[in-house]
Structures are given as structure tokens and as C-alpha cells.
Image: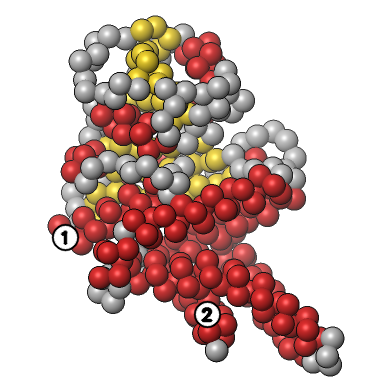
Amino acid sequence: MLLHLILFLSTFFSVLHLLSAHRFKNEKILYNVPQRGISVIIPCYNEAPILKYTIEGVLNIEYSNMEVIFINDGSTDDTFEVLDNLLDLHIWNEKADISLSTKVREIYKSSKHPFIYVIDKYNSGKADSLNIGVAFARKEIIVTMDGDCVLEKSALANMNVIFDDEDVIAAGGVVHIMQMFKLNRRPSRIVVMQALDYIKGFYIYKASLAYNKALNIISGAFGAFRKSVIDEIGGFKKGLGEDIDITIRLQEYAQKNNKKVIYNTNSICYTECPETLIGLIRQRVRWQKGFMDAILNNSSFLIKNLLKNHVCFFMIVDALLSNSLATIVFIVNYILLLFKLFHGYPIHMFAYYVTTIVFNIMSSIIAITEAKKNVT
């Protein structure tokens, strides 16, 4: 009975997300909006091989009122040396009196590009690196990225438009796979599979959540926040799912203060994905651990508002029951179907497979069509 209930919920929400994504529309675009100051914070841990592309992406951004803050989180490879060579760093003492963590070794500024800073620190994790970056930042809007990400040149301009609405406190953008769009090499099958998964995730699942006012994760690879609100809610918390955790806390803040957390498919970022099966499995296990950590850390808010807040409802009933648990259920179900096949009931196997394949083909076509409208 429980297996059938979870499978029903999974099917129900899959159809709901497909229909809701079709109805999703970006916030109305305003033109001639003044450029707000944006601080781009990029934590780096052992990102030496990809930093060249990250920096090239930063330099190609079409936005003038910004600063970029790289945080070297105690990397054990040549991350700092690559930053130094590409940016021509010199020690910067102008703001040495700010109340940063004692984990900071030194602050540097680029001689080539005066809007770029590098904070070199001892290793203490991504959340702490982000908090140090937020403390150092001097702009109104905070954009967080991963060290292996590249922003589309218009990404910040499109985010700036979103924050013209004073009620918007945070916004998520779209993340695509870099190996499919930016790197001059043929992607492997595992990369292609992930690229399709990302496209469906961002153009169907997240678009649906945004339409239903239930966005429960602003990706750590690319998100934008009002600095004042980040400070007010206490910054990023340590853990594997710091991006999910802060999104939930921002949604709690939004509920109490009548504010908005939104999603914008016009702002695009590219990230590097695992290229081996082992790497992919490790990443997905880490994501699931982060998801569970975020739910446990915010369980009081989520359970208390389960039937009153769309974020809480979708987080528990959809993401937990019909997504995470459904993965286990699907494996069990496939085993049961195979058992039935060998005992003379092949029609069940055939019907299940056909339904699954047809639905996945439909959702993939819709997602790819939407992606083509945005990717340049």
C-alpha cells in the first residue's frame, strides 16, 4: 500500500510540474533600470584546472557596477597560484579593519582588473567562505557562484532587473552543463545525460515550483540575494546543503515580511559536471545528504507550516516523499515487475515501461524547447 501511495504521489507531482512549468512566466522585464551594485562571491577549493574559464567568464560579463570576490578556501592544489598569475595580485590593506574571521590569511586585489579581489584563507568550508565574502562585500546585491562556474555575459544585467522590485529578496537562475556549451571537447554519455537532467530540472521542476510559489532551492552554483537580508537571517550555515538551507530560511523570512523569493530563467550560468560514474554517484549522494540536513535543520518551520505554506508542502510531500523516497520505491518496483515477468505477467512490465518512457520523452522535449529559447 505504501509503495503504491508513493508511486502515485510521484506520478501526480510529475504531471503537476509539467503543467505548471508550461504556465510559468518570468517576472515582467523593465528597461532602463539603474545598475545596482552587485558583489559576485566565488568560493574556490582546488579549482585550478577550471579557473581560467571562470575568470574569462567574469571578464566577459556586461555589467559595470560590480565587484568580484574570489575566496581561496585553503586549496591544496595551485588554485591561489593560478589566481595570482591570471590576475596579477597585490596585497590590499585598505579594508584590513573589517571584522573578518581569523581564518583569513591575506586580502589581495588584482592589478589588471581593479574590481576583482582575492581573499586567501585557511580551509573552513563553503558556508564560512561565503560568509566571509558577504562580510567583505560592499554592494547591495550578493551573487554567489561556484569556482567551476561561468556566467552568461547578460546574467547580472538580467538579475539587476529582478531586484528593481523592492519586495524581491532573492532570486535563482538557470544552471547549464559547461561541457555541453562552453568547453571545446566532445561530451561523454554521462555528461549528456546530466545535461538533459539539468535542463529538465531547471525548465520544468524549478519553473513549476516558482509558478506554485514553492521554490525550495536557489542553486549554490548561481543565486542572487539582498545583502541586508542575508545579514539579517544570520548568513550561511555550515553543512552539505547550505544552498537549500538558506533558501528555506529566506522563504520563512519572506512569509513573515511579505517578501518574495523568485526564479529567473533569463539569467544563466554554466557549471562543470562529473565526467565519471563514480564522480556522479558521489555528487548525487552528497546532494541527498545536503537535502536531508536542510530538512532536519528546518523541520520546525517545515512541519509547522506544512499545510499553510507552499514551500513546506512541496518540500515534504513532493521533494521528500515523491522524489527521494520514490527513487528507492522505483528500484523495488522494478524488481517486483521483473518477478512478475518471469511468472507470466509481462503486460505489467510492458505497460509500466511504455508509460515511463513516453512521459520522459514528452518532458525532455518540452524542457529542451524552453532551453533553446534562452541559451545563446
User: Which residue corresponds to the image point at 55% horizontal and 16% vertical from the top-left?
Assistant: 82
First in sequence: mark 1 or mark 2?
Answer: 2
User: Which residue corresponds to the image point at 62% horizontal and 65% vertical from the top-left?
Assistant: 365
Farthest bottom residue in view: 344
Farthest left residue in view: 257
Which of the two residues, 214 or 252, is positioned nearer the viewer here? 252
Is residue 204 visible to the viewer in this orientation of the structure?
yes
* Quadrant holding the C terminus: top right
List the residue tagged with mark 2. Answer: 6
User: Which residue corresponds to the image point at 27% horizontal and 41% vertical from the top-left?
Assistant: 235
Which of the two residues, 354 or 56, is positioned nearer the viewer here? 354
Is 206 placed above or below 113 here? Answer: below
Is 57 placed above or below 301 here? Answer: above
Q: Measure how far apart labels 1 and 2 are at the Cα level.
A: 32 Å
User: Label 1 is placed on what type of residue?
Assistant: Lys
In percent of width and height, residue 98 lies at: 21, 20
Q: Give the image quarter of residue 69.
A: top left
* Quadrant holding the N terminus: bottom right
User: Which residue corresponds to the image point at 35% horizontal and 34% vertical from the top-left?
Assistant: 128
In percent of width and height, residue 318 lies at: 44, 71
Look at the numbered disc 2 and give the secondary structure of its residue: helix
In percent of width and height, residue 373 lies at: 52, 54
In percent of width and height, residue 251 lies at: 27, 58
Is residue 30 visible to the viewer in this orientation of the structure?
no
Of badges 1 and 2, nearer the viewer stands 2
Q: From the viewer's perspective, is 80 left or right of 293?
A: right
User: Label 2 is placed on what type of residue?
Assistant: Ile
Q: Residues within 10 Å of mark 2 (few under 14, many from 20)?
A: many
Which of the two residues, 164 or 289, is positioned nearer the viewer here? 289
Residue 256: numbered disc: 1
Residue 222: numbered disc: none
Q: From the viewer's perspective, is 369 left or right of 265?
A: right
